[in-house]
């Protein structure tokens, strides 16, 4: 049965434009835009009319870096695909790209099928997958080609976590060469894990066991060194490179230098690096464990370089690296040994609001907000213009956003399945009011009306940001 929805009276904001326009939606797609008050818009009729007066009408967010149900350090991330995508919707994100994991000694196919099974029928919003490569060999390199054809067109490698996800330079080079040939985008966790493990061992031997030492051993220079090395390996392979969760000024400088040479090198940062710091890691009574993630939070002075990188486009994307672990029973695994604290923060629900606060604070413009949170991640990972914009033919993933209301972020009110908020007590300006996913209301006037199983797998083309 055909349904038509009309969104009236809002300010439509995309990465390219801001216009007072009405938006017509039919059968899950945006069919037309027309200036509010124009003869064309006045003639439209619909089954459902959404009043967006004094509101922004923006594309649903695309979070290209989440870890639902990720196994890590003897436990699992606390958000399932059901709870995590529901929280995403509450925060105005309508597409996530999660990471399927290859277990060392097993095939990529086996890992991907495991993640398909976790997500299938459970998601409130649409989803795609990247593939984590834990074991690069002739067989898995061949599998990469098949995955690209299947719409899983990006592959993450780790220069960190020896014995778990780590790949050496030779394995990384081979994967990059394969990506250069098949169009797959290589994503890199850039930290020198071999050197970090030495510093961890030495810190623990000195009795330095508190969470703050997690930040001290994972040095900014070792992030910068790995970023530099990844860039050079990508140059040798003739491959584009996407560096995930960039946290340090020195790493941004490596990306900027490469981009100044015209190299296809891209960088992502996350809200935690823009809004939190080592001050949080140093919170007393083991509270700092809540903020343990890798790359780690940096001293506050790094934030200016990250904001500057977002303004100059040396950093293109803000994703969350959403990987929540409860403080009770999960983060507490590292009492007496910071290296045993599960790495990850909750954030999928907070990203769009925190970035709107950045608009209010003057760090970025409204259009840049949409660019780094919606349009560029969609282009970077082969989802544009189906996702990431408001234009005829695009999926009707639309958020009605109230830029004037204020809210206080708190574990008491968030919808992520985790017992703390990384932003507890922080007041931000702006709030999601209504969310449509492919034209279906998932959030209506701050009430959840979605359902598990509405979200579907979205196959992706190769990176469109290179064109």
Image: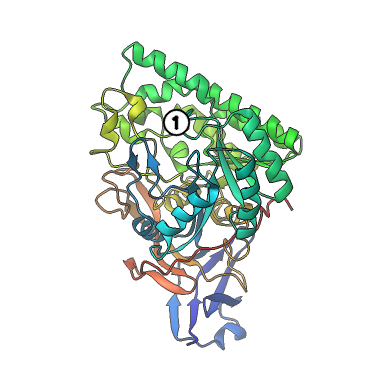
Residue 463 lies, in percent from the top left, at: 66, 52
Give the color scheme: rainbow, by chain, secondary structure or one colour: rainbow
**Left or right position of 422 against 105:** left
| Residue at image point 53% right, 33% down | 304
The reply to whether residue 446 is visible in this rendering is yes
Position of 23 relative to 325 (above/below): below
Residue 346 lies, in percent from the top left, at: 37, 45
User: Dot 1, crowdedness within 10 Å: few (<14), some or many (≥20)?
Assistant: many
The reply to whether residue 255 is visible in this rendering is no
Residue 413 lies, in percent from the top left, at: 27, 54
Residue beneath disc 1: 296
**Left or right position of 355 against 40:** left
Q: Secondary structure at mark 1?
A: loop
Residue 363 lies, in percent from the top left, at: 53, 43
Q: Quadrant of residue 226?
A: top right
**Left or right position of 286 against 358:** left
| Residue at image point 31% right, 13% down | 207
Position of 232 relative to 463 (above/below): above
Given residues 202 and 100, the one toward you in this image is: 100
Position of 257 relative to 15 (above/below): above
**Left or right position of 445 against 294:** left
Position of 76 relative to 62 (above/below): above
Q: Quadrant of residue 444?
A: bottom left
| Residue at image point 44% right, 53% down | 114
């Amino acid at each position: 049965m055909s349904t038509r929805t009309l969104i009236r009276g809002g300010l439509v904001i995309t990465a390219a434009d801001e216009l007072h326009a009405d938006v017509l939606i039919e059968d899950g797609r945006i069919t037309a835009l027309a200036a509010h008050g124009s003869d064309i818009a006045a003639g439209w009729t619909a089954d459902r009319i959404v009043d967006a007066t004094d509101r922004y009408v923006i594309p649903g967010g695309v979070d290209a870096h989440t870890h639902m149900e990720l196994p890590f350090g003897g436990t699992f991330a606390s958000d399932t695909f059901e709870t995590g995508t529901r929280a995403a919707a509450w925060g105005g994100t309508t597409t996530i790209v999660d990471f399927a994991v290859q277990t060392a000694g097993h095939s990529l196919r086996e890992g991907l099928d495991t993640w398909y099974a976790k997500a299938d029928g459970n998601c409130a919003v649409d989803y795609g997958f990247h593939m984590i490569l834990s074991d690069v060999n002739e067989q898995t390199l061949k599998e990469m080609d098949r995955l690209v054809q299947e719409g899983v067109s990006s592959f993450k490698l780790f220069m960190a976590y020896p014995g778990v996800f780590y790949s050496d330079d030779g394995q990384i080079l081979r994967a990059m060469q394969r990506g250069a040939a098949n169009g797959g985008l290589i994503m890199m966790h850039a930290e020198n894990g071999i050197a970090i493990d030495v510093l961890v061992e030495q810190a623990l031997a000195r009795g330095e066991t508190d969470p703050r030492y997690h930040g001290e051993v994972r040095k900014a220079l070792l992030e910068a060194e790995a970023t530099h090395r990844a860039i050079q390996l990508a140059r040798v392979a003739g491959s584009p490179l996407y560096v995930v969760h960039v946290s340090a000024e020195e790493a941004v400088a490596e990306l900027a230098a490469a981009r100044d040479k015209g190299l296809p090198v891209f960088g992502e940062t996350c809200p935690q690096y823009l809004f939190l710091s080592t001050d949080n890691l140093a919170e007393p009574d083991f509270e700092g464990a809540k903020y343990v993630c890798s790359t780690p939070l940096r001293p506050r002075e790094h934030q200016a370089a990250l904001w500057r990188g977002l303004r100059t486009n040396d950093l293109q994307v803000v994703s969350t690296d959403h990987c929540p672990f409860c403080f009770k029973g999960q983060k507490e695994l590292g009492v007496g040994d910071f290296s045993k604290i599960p790495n990850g923060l909750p954030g999928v629900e907070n990203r769009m609001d925190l970035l709107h606060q950045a608009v209010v604070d003057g760090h970025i413009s409204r259009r840049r907000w949409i660019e780094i949170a919606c349009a560029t991640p969609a282009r970077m990972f082969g989802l544009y213009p189906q996702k990431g914009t408001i234009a005829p033919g695009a999926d009707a993933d639309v958020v009605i956003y109230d830029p004037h209301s204020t809210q206080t972020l708190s574990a008491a009110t968030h919808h992520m399945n985790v017992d703390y908020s990384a932003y507890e007590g922080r007041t931000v300006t702006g709030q999601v009011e209504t969310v449509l996913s492919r034209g279906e209301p998932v959030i209506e006037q701050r009430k959840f009306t979605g359902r598990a199983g509405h979200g579907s797998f979205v196959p992706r083309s190769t990176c469109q940001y290179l064109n």
